């Protein structure tokens, strides 16, 4: 499907959830888990600094690495559907130029400074707790380097440095699990985490030669070489963030257009509008049971909302006729799917693709439908899903010229038409959804089902 600059619904959901998370007050569970982690991390950092071996501390190296960390911390870079911070450009020099036992405490101090200094997030205790808890990653590399690392940087110790990076990734994984537990949210897609870990690995490879030179005879001033890279990353992050914002705005525009067209239908025919909303709800549930991805589910939703939009071009005397339509009237009525497609093609973008789905919502699985007499899998899966939801809603809703069928009779009719009128798999998914007690009770409350 043509996506324009339109990101996937899953990506949208994660970005919106992240923005909502920043605005919302945190639950007591969140405070307990984040606060507990912060206390453990802070206690461990203090213990490392007090009990761990501390070799000569270069004040210039401390200032340079802390400033570099603070600058990196202010830079948010979109990676997939998530955000990362390029602190590896500062973390690697920290561990090579400072005593490893001090790094966790220095990192936590930088995280707190990020919150309380101007330009950071709003100063709240929850924000400070979260940043301290997030610094738990530093304990992994510090432990590895204290136990196995050489007194001074050596390229021959590369396996130790790799192990330190792996330990950091593992601690990051524990941090992610902490968020899932604190927020009661589902785990982030492993592919997204993979992109973040790959980003950290690449940034570490960039930082290592510069940090090695700074740890040698060149001195901490070599870290200034990081500044151009950070400037370039800032430009790229701003550009990609703008694309994300534009994509979310475009998503809202498509949904707003669908809802606006729904209101046009409602003004013209209240039954059609209510019918379309009910069909959309059921169709999305069926699509979910069939395992369709988020893009297909969105197409099903939009297609179901708009599957009758072409009826605005059907004369009122036909659309609102109390009795059955004659053959000439059916010829006009059967044009509404093609008319709907043409209307949505005018809108363009994602809704243009939805128009193709709308066109085929009245095809039949055996090829006897309209307008193109497609059969089987020639019919888009989204159209097949909408067709079963549309038929169920039509059968179980009273009209001026007939009463609704009972649930039992409607179920029997759907089974009978599986393989002829409808995709058998879609029918099976619909029947599984319909026979769920929650759905039957909900429909019964609305008076649409007469059992």
Image (cartoon, rainbow, N blue to C red):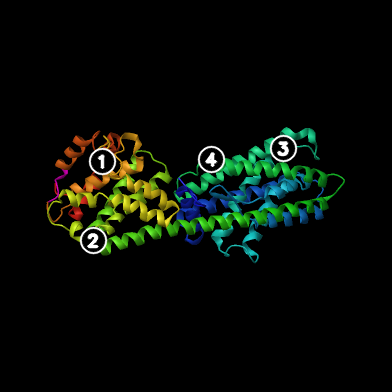
Residue with the mark numbered 1:
369
What is the crowding at mark 1: few (fewer than 14 residues within 10 Å), some, or many (at least 20)? some
Mark 1 or mark 2: whose residue is earlier in sequence: 2
Q: Is residue 370 in view from this perspective?
A: yes
> Residues under labels 4 and 3: Cα distance?
25 Å
Q: Which secondary structure lies at badge 4? A: helix
Q: Nearer the viewer, mark 3 or mark 1?
A: 1
Mark 3 or mark 1: whose residue is earlier in sequence: 3
Mark 2 or mark 3: whose residue is earlier in sequence: 3
> Residues under labels 4 and 1: Cα distance?
41 Å
Q: Which secondary structure lies at badge 3? A: helix
Give the label on residue 270, or none: 2
Residue with the mark numbered 3:
161
What is the crowding at mark 4: few (fewer than 14 residues within 10 Å), some, or many (at least 20)? few
Task: Write down the region rendered in magenta.
Answer: 403-407
Residue with the mark numbered 4:
191
Q: Is residue 178 left or right of residue 308?
A: right
What is the crowding at mark 3: few (fewer than 14 residues within 10 Å), some, or many (at least 20)? many
What is the crowding at mark 2: few (fewer than 14 residues within 10 Å), some, or many (at least 20)? some
Q: Relative to 263, is 237 above or below?
A: above
> Residues under labels 1 and 2: Cα distance?
26 Å
Q: Residue at x 56, y 63 (%)?
A: 124
Mark 4 or mark 1: whose residue is earlier in sequence: 4
Q: Is residue 50 in view from this perspective?
A: no
């Amino acid at each position: 499907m043509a996506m324009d600059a339109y990101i996937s619904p899953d990506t949208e959901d994660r970005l919106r959830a992240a923005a909502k998370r920043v605005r919302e007050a945190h639950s007591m569970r969140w405070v307990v888990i984040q606060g507990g982690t912060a206390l453990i991390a802070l206690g461990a950092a203090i213990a490392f600094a007090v009990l761990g071996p501390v070799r000569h501390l270069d004040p210039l190296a401390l200032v340079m690495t802390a400033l570099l960390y603070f600058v990196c911390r202010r830079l948010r870079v979109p990676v997939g559907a998530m955000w990362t911070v390029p602190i590896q450009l500062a973390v690697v020099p920290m561990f090579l130029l400072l005593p490893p036992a001090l790094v966790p405490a220095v990192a936590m101090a930088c995280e707190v400074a990020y919150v309380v200094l101007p330009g950071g997030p709003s100063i709240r205790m929850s924000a400070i707790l979260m940043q301290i808890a997030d610094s738990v990653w530093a304990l992994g590399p510090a432990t590895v380097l204290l136990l196995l690392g050489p007194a001074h940087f050596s390229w021959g110790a590369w396996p130790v440095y790799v192990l330190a990076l792996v330990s950091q990734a593992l601690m990051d994984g524990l941090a992610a699990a902490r968020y899932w537990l604190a927020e009661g949210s589902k785990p982030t897609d492993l592919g997204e985490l993979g992109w973040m870990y790959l980003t950290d690995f690449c940034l570490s490879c960039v930082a290592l030669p510069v940090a090695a030179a700074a740890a040698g005879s060149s001195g901490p001033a070599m870290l200034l070489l990081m500044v151009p890279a950070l400037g370039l990353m800032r430009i790229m992050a701003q550009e990609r963030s703008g694309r994300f914002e534009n994509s979310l705005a475009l998503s809202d525009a498509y949904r707003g257009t669908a809802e606006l067209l729904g209101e046009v239908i409602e003004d013209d025919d209240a039954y059609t509008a209510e019918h379309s909303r009910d069909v959309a709800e059921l169709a999305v549930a069926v699509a979910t049971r069939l395992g369709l991805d988020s893009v297909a589910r969105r197409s099903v939703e939009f297609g179901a909302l708009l599957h009758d939009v072409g009826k605005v071009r059907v004369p009122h005397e036909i659309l609102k006729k109390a009795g059955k339509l004659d053959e000439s009237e059916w010829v006009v009525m059967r044009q509404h799917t093609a008319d709907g497609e043409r209307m949505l093609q005018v809108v363009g973008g994602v809704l243009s693709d939805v128009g193709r789905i709308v066109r085929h919502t009245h095809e039949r699985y055996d090829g006897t439908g309209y307008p193109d007499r497609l059969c089987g899998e020639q019919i888009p899966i989204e159209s097949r899903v909408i067709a079963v939801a549309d038929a169920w809603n039509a059968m179980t809703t009273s009209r001026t010229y007939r009463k609704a069928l009972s649930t039992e009779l409607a179920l029997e009719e759907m089974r009978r038409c599986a393989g002829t009128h409808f995709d058998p798999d879609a029918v099976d998914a619909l029947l599984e959804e319909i026979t769920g007690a929650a759905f039957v009770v909900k429909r019964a409350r609305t008076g649409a089902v007469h059992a």
